[in-house]
Amino acid sequence: MKRKRHGTEEIIRKLREAKQLEAGGQSLAQVCQKLEISGATLARWRTQFRGMGDNEVKRLRALEEENRRLKKAVADLTLDKQILKELNEGKW
């Protein structure tokens, strides 16, 4: 089975839907089957995103994007530093 990546908003939506389905009397297995996720995934999501609202999800996404951008900047600067160091040592 192909692995699917879920976005933060999609995870929150599925957690809300799972809560509604369980309140409606469906079993955990039925909920997981309807949401097309495993029981372990649902449990992990519940611990990770417990009590998160829309504002916190947006903030989390913004922080993840900033983290990705900063990691890319650090990688670029590290590469530039290595190139300059090699040029300074006369390896070219």
Image (cartoon, grey):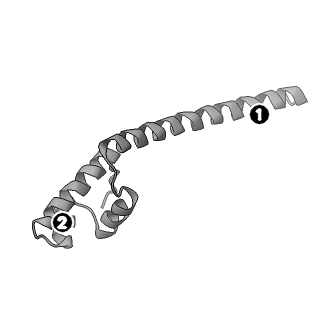
Foreground of the two, 89 or 36:
36
Q: Which mark is residue 31?
A: 2
Instruction: Please say if 53 is above or below 33.
Output: above
Secondary structure of the residue carrying numbered label 1: helix
Q: Position of residue 10 (x, y in %)?
A: 27, 48
Q: Which mark is residue 67?
A: none
Within-10-Å neighbours for mark 2: few <14, some 14–19, many 20+: many
Within-10-Å neighbours for mark 1: few <14, some 14–19, many 20+: few
Q: Nearer the viewer, mark 2 or mark 1?
A: 2
Q: Position of residue 87 (x, y in %)?
A: 83, 26
Q: Residue at x 22, y 55 (%)?
A: 16
Q: Residue at x 32, y 50 (%)?
A: 6
Amino acid type shown at disc 1: Gln
Amino acid type shown at disc 2: Val
Secondary structure of the residue carrying numbered label 2: helix
Query: Which of the 4 quarters of the picture holds residue 25?
Result: bottom left
Q: Residue at x 24, y 50 (%)?
A: 13
- In primary-sequence order, the first of circles 2 and 1 is 2
Foreground of the two, 34 or 3:
34
In this rendering, position of residue 17 left or right of residue 56: left
Q: Residue at x 50, y 35 (%)?
A: 66
Q: Dot 1 corresponds to which residue?
A: 82
Which part of the image, by quadrant, shows the C terminus? top right
Query: Which of the 4 quarters of the picture holds residue 49?
Result: bottom left
Q: Are marks 2 and 1 in contact (CB under 8 Å)?
A: no
Q: How many marks?
A: 2
Q: Position of residue 28 (x, y in %)?
A: 20, 71
Distance CA(mark 2)–CA(mark 1): 52 Å
In this rendering, position of residue 78 left or right of residue 61: right
In this rendering, position of residue 9 left or right of residue 48: left
Foreground of the two, 77 or 23:
23
